[in-house]
Amino acid sequence: MASATKLTVKKIPTKRTPLAASPQSIELPEGMRARITNKAFELWEELGCRDGHDLEDWLDAEASVMEEIHEARE
């Protein structure tokens, strides 16, 4: 009879708090959602209208818009 080996997995606690766990939603400044939406659509078109990458396109668009705002303030 073969003996079974028991593996123990140690869970490492994370310091990040998921946004979904926050009690309040984050509101974007007026016009920001429209800018991000337009940029995400542009990225979607530039990348060949690929399905299944909507979150990635949104996050890339968000980063791009935030960078534009940051550069404009400097």
Image: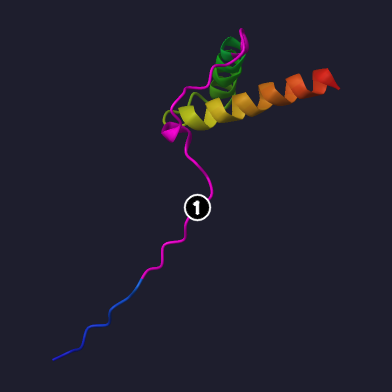
Is residue 51 found inside the magenta-colored segment of the image? no
Percent of width and height locating residue 22: 46, 31
Q: Identify the image quadrant of the C terminus.
A: top right
Q: Position of residue 13 (x, y in %)?
A: 47, 56
Query: Does 8 appear above or below 20?
Result: below
Q: Name the residue rendered at 77%, 24% in the picture.
A: 70
Q: Nearer the viewer, residue 45 or 67?
A: 67
Pick whichever, 4 or 16, lies toward us: 16
Residue at left offset 52%, top offset 22%: 26
Magenta segment main secondary structure: loop
Start-end of magenta stretch: 9-32
User: 42 or 17, which lies in front?
Assistant: 17
Q: Residue at x 50, y 41 (%)?
A: 17
The residue shown at (56%, 29%) is 59
In the orientation shown, which residue stands out farthest toward the front? 23
- Check disc 1: other Cα within 10 Å, few if <14, some if 14-19, many if 20+: few
In the picture of the structure, the residue carrying the numbered disc 1 is: 14
